[in-house]
Image (cartoon, rainbow, N blue to C red):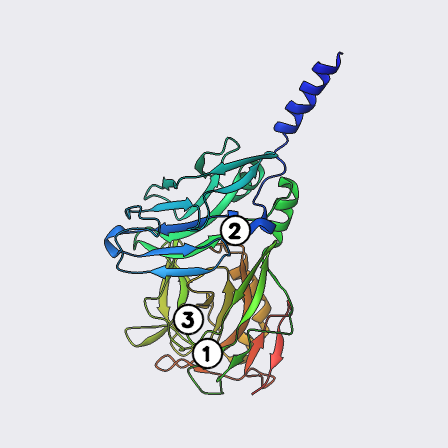
Amino acid sequence: MDKNTLLTLVKVEKETSFEPTGFVRRAIETMGVIEYCINAASGTFWRRDENGVSSTHNLQTSFGDGTVLADRTFIHYPSHDQSEFSFIANGRKISKTTTQIIQHPNTSVKQIICYDLNGDITLASGVENAILETVLIAVVTINVAKQKKIVFGDERHGLMSSETHLAEHKQGAKWTRQDDGFLLSGITDNGSTYSNITGGEILDEDITHVIGATTNAPFVYLEGVEWDLSDVNDTNLALKVNGLVVYNSFNGTNWILTPIGGDYIIMFFFVTNDGENPIFKIVGQKLYENRTLARQDFHGACTKILSGNLPTPEFLAVYGVIVHNESIGQVEKGADNEIYIDYRYGFPVSMYE
């Protein structure tokens, strides 16, 4: 085998190895801006800049670069002080100097947006396929029926092999420091609200999400077969429908919201990588006859939600609270007299008033 043939084979093997892929995060100014609009009539789009800073723009007719808003549209373009953004696909640098646009059909809940190895923006059929075969940009979870954005996740990860990326992805998000940040305050026995959750950080593979203090949050729950979130962000510890506290029940076909009656539920706080709502309150999916049974199931109930096809793996459990009283939704101390349970250490830890 002559030298030129050998070099050609090596070159072909390198170009079909699917590694490395991603963005050069140490040159973050070249990562560009990503934006998404689900419904042009609402005049709302969500934005992540080259530093991962999030913002929401309402009552607009165009994206930040002047592109006209359109339903279910994602765009990626150079930031205002740059002439291009770039990424590495299959070991080759690809630069873009113009806005890259893609629309997705009104048929799916989770949209996985990426660049193929030729550098063309496209949609992937699954996150694992996207990691192994493309350059992942964003994962957007929407409620198709209600035309709502649930989570807009920035997935512009740094350079790594596809195998490493997939292994990191399967681990989900992690705490940067478990004993610091996301401190819950203002919750009391027989109370029905909380006051505040302080800021903190989570690590999504090689992306650090710095999250500020949060004084209110929406409820997230399953309805039908899709994730939905409440229209109002508040400090309530229970979701009410027609004045009654509800839990998320499954009737064999669809998920519905059902009044709790005289029983107890667990309401959860989760932190995620969504820029608009980094803290979610997830409605409990099980009823308990008394507080002791609820307390005994803190681990199992949280594990069930985590294994239940959440909008993104970047969901970390923060706290769990026992709630009862169908007309109020008030906190009930656990059997060991704790006021809430702390999940930041990876397992339930009792926290007292």
Label 2 sits on what residue type? Glu
Q: Residues within 10 Å of mark 2 (few under 14, many from 20)?
A: some
Label 1 sits on what residue type? Val
Whole-percent x, y for residue 260 in the image = 39, 73
Q: Nearer the viewer, residue 99 or 158?
A: 99
User: Residue at image x 56%, y 70%?
Assistant: 200
Look at mark 1 in the image and give the residue it sits on: 323
Look at mark 3 in the image and give the residue it sits on: 217
Give the number of the mark in front: 1 or 3: 3
**Of helix, strand and loop, which one carries label 1?**
strand
Whole-percent x, y for residue 113 in the image = 45, 43
Using the image, tell me which numbered label, if any, was put on residue 29.
2
Give the number of the mark in front: 2 or 3: 2
| Distance between the alpha carbons at the discs numbered 1 and 3 | 17 Å
Give the number of the mark in front: 1 or 2: 2
Cβ–Cβ under 8 Å for marks 2 and 3 = no
The answer to which of marks 2 and 3 sits earlier in the sequence is 2
**Of helix, strand and loop, which one carries label 2?**
helix
Q: Nearer the viewer, residue 113 or 309?
A: 113
**Of helix, strand and loop, which one carries label 3?**
loop
Q: Is residue 253 visible?
A: no
Q: Quadrant of residue 235?
A: bottom left
Q: Nearer the viewer, residue 171 or 76?
A: 76
The answer to which of marks 1 and 3 sits earlier in the sequence is 3
Report the side of 288 relative to 16 (left or right): left
The answer to which of marks 1 and 2 sits earlier in the sequence is 2
Report the side of 191 relative to 244 (left or right): right
Q: Residues within 10 Å of mark 1 (few under 14, many from 20)?
A: many
Q: Residues within 10 Å of mark 3 (few under 14, many from 20)?
A: many
